[in-house]
Image (tube, rainbow, N blue to C red):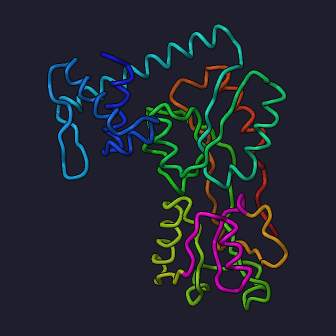
């Protein structure tokens, strides 16, 4: 069986449409269909079936994907063993990361790695934690930087290794001159009558904030959704909204905004995630080590 065809089937099991698989693999939708058809010819049994606009796997397809998972894991283990014997930090490495980490400490880590390991070529892509974990599982990313608000670490049990990088405190953003601007800390309940702007680069983070409001008895009135920190800052700065954002995103918030700790003190943990056992690979080990060194130790603000 052809490896690329197995990978195509594996992607289809996760993404469920030919178009999504085509985007992930960088080929056309018709090429995806051809790869699946050729794989079905190789194994002699139908592997997929149409369901509306999507595609689901037959029992045979599901069984084959389980084998493919093990096959790819063994191949990656072999690559790691060879790389460990060579003890060379070189080659391509892909980091998938949430935007707040991408705009704070990861560039510094990449700069230092370029100095220490000039033959290591790193490509960073920003995406939500769930999308990043999917990319890791599909071998489209080698390391994912994500937080435990946006994804559940328990879902990775047995398939990935997690390296703790730092804790990131959550803060309330207020426009200058806001009625709560003199408060030392702010509780969510004090914000029930405000208009909110929320960063939706991670839909899970947005849902978590909204659910925290619901848990204390109110639905936040949201007048701004954006996947750009700058847009959220602009709405708050103009006095249109307030927001709750992590400290990593507040590097350049400007003097026209007031930043106050959320009470009770609320944190998220930031992790670097790699496939199980691949931290032995010298290039992955080097990047994990530098990420841990570059991550901020104290994100508290007065």
Q: Position of residue 13 (x, y in %)?
A: 31, 38
Vertical arrangement, residue 144 with respect to residue 173, above or below: above
Please state if 127 lies on the left or on the right of 73 as rendered.
Answer: right
Residue at position x 45%, y 39% in the image? 24
Depth check, front residue: 290 or 64 = 64
Depth check, front residue: 252 or 160 = 252
Please state if 141 lies on the left or on the right of 293 as rendered.
Answer: left
Looking at the figure, which quarter contains the C terminus?
bottom right
Residue at position x 78%, y 31% in the image? 113
Residue at position x 65%, y 40% in the image? 124
Give the number of marks. Answer: 0
Q: Position of residue 130 (x, y in %)?
A: 48, 49
Depth check, front residue: 241 or 268 = 241
Please state if 164 lies on the left or on the right of 59 as rendered.
Answer: right
The stretch of residues the image draws in magenta is: 223-249
Q: Position of residue 227 (x, y in %)?
A: 59, 63
Res 65 quadrant in image: top left
Vertical arrangement, residue 155 with respect to residue 85, above or below: below
Vertical arrangement, residue 158 with respect to residue 41, above or below: below
Res 187 quadrant in image: bottom right
Q: Is residue 51 magenta?
A: no
Looking at the figure, which quarter contains the N terminus?
top left
In this view, the residue farthest toward the left is 45
Vertical arrangement, residue 137 with respect to residue 84, above or below: below
Residue at position x 72%, y 80% in the image? 174
Q: Is residue 224 magenta?
A: yes
Q: Position of residue 79 (x, y in %)?
A: 54, 15
């Amino acid at each position: 069986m052809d490896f690329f065809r197995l990978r195509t089937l594996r992607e289809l099991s996760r993404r469920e449409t030919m178009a999504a698989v085509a985007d992930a693999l960088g080929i056309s939708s018709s090429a995806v269909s051809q790869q699946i058809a050729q794989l079905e010819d190789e194994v002699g049994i139908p592997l997929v079936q149409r369901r509306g606009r999507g595609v689901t796997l037959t029992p045979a397809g599901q069984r084959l994907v389980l084998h493919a998972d093990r096959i790819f894991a063994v191949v990656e283990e072999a690559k790691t063993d060879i790389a460990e014997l060579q003890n060379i930090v070189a080659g391509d490495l892909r980091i998938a990361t949430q935007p707040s980490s991408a705009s704070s400490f990861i560039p510094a880590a990449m700069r230092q790695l370029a100095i220490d390991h000039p033959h290591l070529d790193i490509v960073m892509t920003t995406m939500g934690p769930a999308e990043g974990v999917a990319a890791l599982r599909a071998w489209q990313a080698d390391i994912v930087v994500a937080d435990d608000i946006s994804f559940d670490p328990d879902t990775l049990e047995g398939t990935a290794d997690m390296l703790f990088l730092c804790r990131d405190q959550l803060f309330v953003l207020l426009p200058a001159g806001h009625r709560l601007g003199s408060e030392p800390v702010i509780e969510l309940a004090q914000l029930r009558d405000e208009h909110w702007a929320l960063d939706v680069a991670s839909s899970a983070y947005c849902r978590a904030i909204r659910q925290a409001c619901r848990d204390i008895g109110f639905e936040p009135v949201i007048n701004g959704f954006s996947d750009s920190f700058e847009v959220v800052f602009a709405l708050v700065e103009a006095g249109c909204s307030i927001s709750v954002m992590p400290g990593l995103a507040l590097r350049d918030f400007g003097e026209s905004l007031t930043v106050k700790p959320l009470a009770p003190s609320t944190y998220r943990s930031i992790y670097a995630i790699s496939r199980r056992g691949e931290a032995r690979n010298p290039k992955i080990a080097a990047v994990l080590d530098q990420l841990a060194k570059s991550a901020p130790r104290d994100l508290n603000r007065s």
